[in-house]
Image: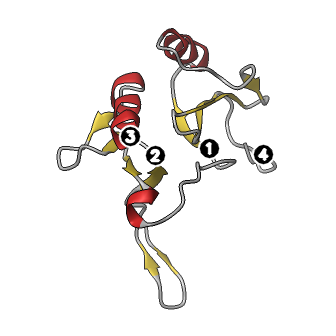
Amino acid sequence: MRWSGADVQIEKTDFVAIPSQDAERAAAFYGETLGLRSDEHSQYEFWAGDICLGIWEPAKMGMEFQPSKNGHVAFHVPDVAAAREELEGKGVTFNGETFDTGVCHMALFEDPDGNDLMLHNRYAPYSGDSAA
């Protein structure tokens, strides 16, 4: 399915950019700690399902580093509590308790650069008035 605006044809998302101050450290976190599949063509790209996360260093492009805040990358997991426990065992610190919104469970954490991330699992079907 393609979305078509006036003159723009957006076909899909190619990647989500993940800013870092240390790409090697970030690659170890996404590949080893989170266990994401690394891309065969790049040591700084990792796959979460069919979404590619591309690590980049803004300073190498003359830009100021700023972590991605208030726009969590939400990783779908079958069991948020079990995934959280496993990551805590690997040294990941979570921001508060796991949320139960009535339709999903969410556990918020950050990567080593302070980028907002989330473990997520929707356990109830979508309804017309739910945005979670």
Q: Nearer the viewer, residue 69 or 105?
A: 69
* Dot placed on the residue nearer the N-terminal end, 1 or 3: 3
Q: CA distance from mark 1 to mark 2?
A: 18 Å
What's under tag 2, amino acid-wise? Gln
Question: Which structural element holds mark 4?
Answer: loop
The amino acid beneath tag 1 is His
Q: Which residue is mark 1?
A: 72
Sooner in the amino-acid sequence: mark 3 or mark 4? 3
Rounded to the nearest angstrom, the CA distance separating label 1 from label 3 is 16 Å
Q: Residues within 10 Å of mark 1 (few under 14, many from 20)?
A: some
What x and y, as percent, mark residue 24?
A: 33, 37
Q: Nearer the viewer, mark 4 or mark 1?
A: 1
Say the numbered circle drawn on residue 21: 2
Q: Position of residue 14 (x, y in %)?
A: 37, 60
Closer to the camera, 98 or 123? 98
Residue at point 54%, 20% (across, down): 92
- Which residue is tagged 3? 49
Which mark is nearer the camera, 3 or 4? 3
